Amino acid sequence: MPEERKKRKYILEEYFVSVVLILMLVLYFVNVVSRFTINFPILFTDSLLTSLFPWVTFLGAPAVCFRKMNIAFTLVTDHIIPRKYQKYVELFTTVVSIFLFSLLLYYGLVKTINDFQYNNTINNLNNAPRWIFSAGIPMGAAAYIIRTAQVSVRAFRSKNEKGGPL
């Protein structure tokens, strides 16, 4: 008898990314079909797909971080650094990650505010406000900072209870 699977809880970012990816897939498929069957491409889909990409990218990163499935180079931490110091390396990488995404949050906010203040639009999307699409950068960066802190706190609590390295 196969083992029963645990029910997996999904986080908000995973739902959002799933919906946007399905929307992008449908739009792309409709565009390809219309281009090759009736020789009439839907022009706004290229701009819309390009504009939705930051949302998928920057809200997908926190979901990957939350699942601890992000790319990691573990040769140094697993084989060179002694086990008792590995939690400090984990703390260092967490601090650096939060710092980098704080910069991304700041500059993403600056870009989004500038797009809003100067009423920048995307011509191919019937002059849709650009700030709606650039807002994905600071929102994703903020979500990444929160998820990184959650994962790090959870890891430190579990390792402190077990008394082992991260």
Image (cartoon, rainbow, N blue to C red):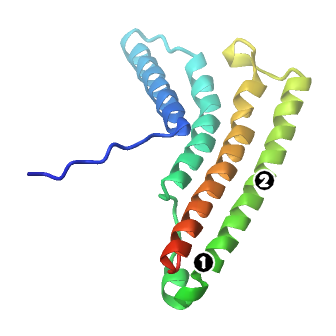
Tell me the kind of residue under disc 1: Lys
Where disc 1 sits, the SS reads helix
Would you place residue 3 above or below residue 152 in this image?
above
Residue beneath the point at 61% across and 86% down: 85
Q: Position of residue 53 (x, y in %)?
A: 59, 35
Q: Name the side, left or right, on which 162 lies relative to 53.
A: left
The residue beneath circle 2 is: 102
Q: Is residue 100 shown above or below 18?
A: below
Disc 1 and disc 2: Cα gap in Å? Answer: 22 Å
Which SS class for mark 2?
helix
Determine crowd level at label 1: few under 14, some 14-19, many 20+ residues with C-alpha closer than 10 A: some
**On the picture, is 113 further left or further right than 52?**
right
> In the drawing, does residue 73 fall left or right of residue 110?
left
Residue closest to the eye, 59 or 32: 59
Q: Position of residue 18 (x, y in %)?
A: 47, 33
Q: Quadrant of residue 97?
A: bottom right
Question: In the orientation shown, which residue stands out farthest toward the left?
Answer: 1
Q: Quadrant of residue 108?
A: top right
Please report contact status of discs 1 and 2: CB closer than 8 Å, yes or no: no
> Looking at the image, is mark 1 or mark 2 earlier in the sequence?
1
**Residue topped by disc 1:** 87
Disc 2: CA contacts within 10 A as few (<14), some (14-19) or many (>=20):
some
Report the mark closest to the observer, 1 or 2.
Answer: 1
Residue at coordinates 52% horizontally, 59% vertically from top-left? 70
> In x, y percent, where is residue 161?
52, 73
Comparing 116 with 161, the one in front is 161
Give the residue displayed 87% in from the left and 31% down from the top: 113
Q: Is residue 110 above or below residue 51?
A: below
Q: Residue at x 67, y 65 (%)?
A: 94
* Farthest residue, direction right: 117
